[in-house]
Image (cartoon, helix red, strand yellow):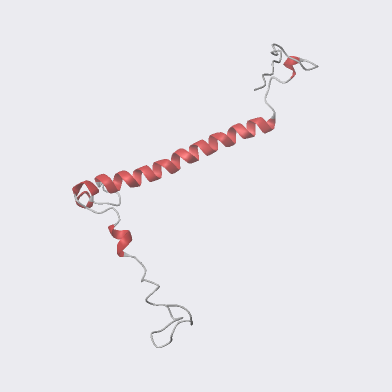
Amino acid sequence: MAIINEPHRTGYQGEGDVHATIAPAASDRSRLYAGYVWAVTRLALGWVFLWAFLDKTFGLGHETASEAAWVNGGSPTEGFLANEPPDRSRTSSTTSPEQPGPTGCS
């Protein structure tokens, strides 16, 4: 295993005035503001999903009545599963019982 020993840099190594760039550049500020926007968006989206979970769990009355809450024996997926589309394998128009399938298939 090789070990590389390099001297540590303790000071400013470049040329020019060290204090020349006190204010951040415009691109740095826009990246900072974009970071704030993404942080707020992420928190807002998290709150939407947390509220939906809490409403289904405890029946807070916004979309789920307290009688239908998960803690009171309700099902959180009942409405979603009740609107399930019909099974496509039974309604397929490409094959019918009278027409045999391709040869070589069992």
Side (left or right) of 22 relative to 62? right
Side (left or right) of 30 relative to 102? right
Q: Residue at x 54, y 34 (%)?
A: 36
Residue 73, placed above or below residue 81: above
Between 19 and 92, the one lying in front of the other is 92
Q: Residue at x 34, y 65 (%)?
A: 84
Quadrant assignment for the N terminus = top right
Query: Which of the 4 quarters of the picture holds residue 26?
Result: top right
Residue 80, placed above or below residue 46: below
Please state the total of marks drawn on the protein image: 0
Quadrant assignment for the C terminus = bottom left
Q: Residue at x 30, y 64 (%)?
A: 82
Q: Residue at x 67, y 19 (%)?
A: 3
**Residue 39, how many percent across, how many down?**
50, 36
**Residue 12, how many percent across, how many down?**
73, 14
Residue 49, placed above or below residue 9: below
In the current view of this chain or complex, which residue is farthest to the bottom?
A: 98
